[in-house]
Image: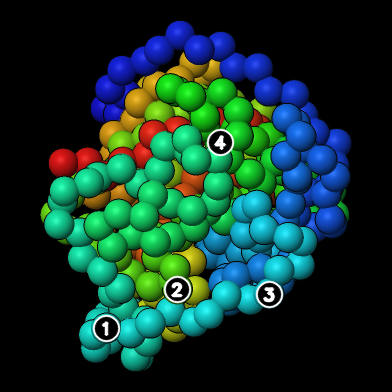
Amino acid sequence: MPLLACSANDPMSLPRSMNRAGNNAGGAAAGGKPSTGGSGSPGGLSGAPSSSGGMPGATGGAHTAGSPAGGAPGAAGTTSSAGSSGGGSGPVVCAKSTGMDPLIDDFEDSNIALKETDGRTGIWETFDDSSLTGVYSTRYPMGAGHQGVGWCTDVSGYAQWGANLVASMADPKCGYDASVYKGVCFWAKGKVTAGGPLIFAIGTNDTVPTTSGGKCKSATSCNSHYELKLSGDNALTDSYKQYCVEWSKLALPSIAMPKPLDPSGIVQVEWKFPAGAGVSTDGTICVDDITFMK
């Protein structure tokens, strides 16, 4: 069943950047803003790659969007309650939503911080597999949005597991209780030329490793998040459309973890360009006006 709620005529026009943003220090990005990235930035993911080609394994590179190249590692997440499923003690929940303000970010402030409201103090990050041929055209929220500023980027050349655009829900990283909501809505446009299809995913305490603010310690299931492929009727188009995804529509790619998503410990909201079977990523995405769904 299509997830599309509405659409707007907004033809995509996004030139590719030739700078090697993320793995090398970048030059100036479009509009005079610095292109940024670099390895060693806050909260890099670790562990084995998921069988579905999801989040990075030990070779993956993590980058905080908009931060200086080679930034220092972020602080460890805080702990506010005892451990749940996923293994061991560690960061669990930083804050609980009251449901008063569902907006996660609309990018109108053109920075890497999520909207600071209702206990949310998170940041935007990009993750990739560090392929030498890989390129993000920008790692900074800028470009034509649904209503003003959005985050548009081209992603190409990542050949191992791919590359992701990630909203980490709290800083320091830990779970955020969004159980008052029933899902996430966002506006998006774009295309996937190779690799893919694009995946929308939610990382929870059960799936995010302790090193990145979750509770997962399993070598085989960490970083294999709750996901939905944006394909078929739900595929990206060259005009902005709103997608509303209920928690129940997101599923773990591994049948070894059939449990439903628990929204009381959300660590990451992400859009993934997967690679695999000898096919590198190649695509474009613009996202804007991301909110929780009442």
Q: Earlier in the sequence, mark 3 or mark 2?
A: 3
Residue at 38% over, 73% down: 174
The local secondary structure at tag 3 comes to loop
**Quick check: 72 above or below 26?**
below
Q: Earlier in the sequence, mark 2 or mark 4?
A: 4
Q: CA distance from mark 2 to mark 4?
A: 23 Å
Check disc 1: other Cα within 10 Å, few if <14, some if 14-19, many if 20+: some
**Quick check: 266 above or below 247?**
below
Residue at 42% over, 37% down: 106
Which residue is under mark 2?
172
Check disc 4: other Cα within 10 Å, few if <14, some if 14-19, many if 20+: many
Residue nearest the viewer, comparing 97 with 86 = 97
Residue at 71% over, 68% down: 71
Which residue is under mark 3?
72
Check disc 2: other Cα within 10 Å, few if <14, some if 14-19, many if 20+: many
Which residue appears farthest toward the top when viewing the image? 9
Which residue is under mark 1?
80
Q: CA distance from mark 1 to mark 2?
A: 12 Å
User: Can residue 288 be seen by looking at this rendering?
Assistant: yes
Quarter of the image that includes the C terminus: top left
Q: Amino acid at mark 4?
A: Trp
Q: Earlier in the sequence, mark 1 or mark 3?
A: 3
Q: Is residue 64 left or right of residue 17?
A: left
Q: Amino acid at mark 2?
A: Pro
Residue 58, position in %: x, y? 67, 74
Residue 11, position in %: x, y? 56, 11
The figure's colour scheme reads rainbow
Q: Amino acid at mark 3?
A: Ala
Residue 129, position in %: x, y? 70, 59
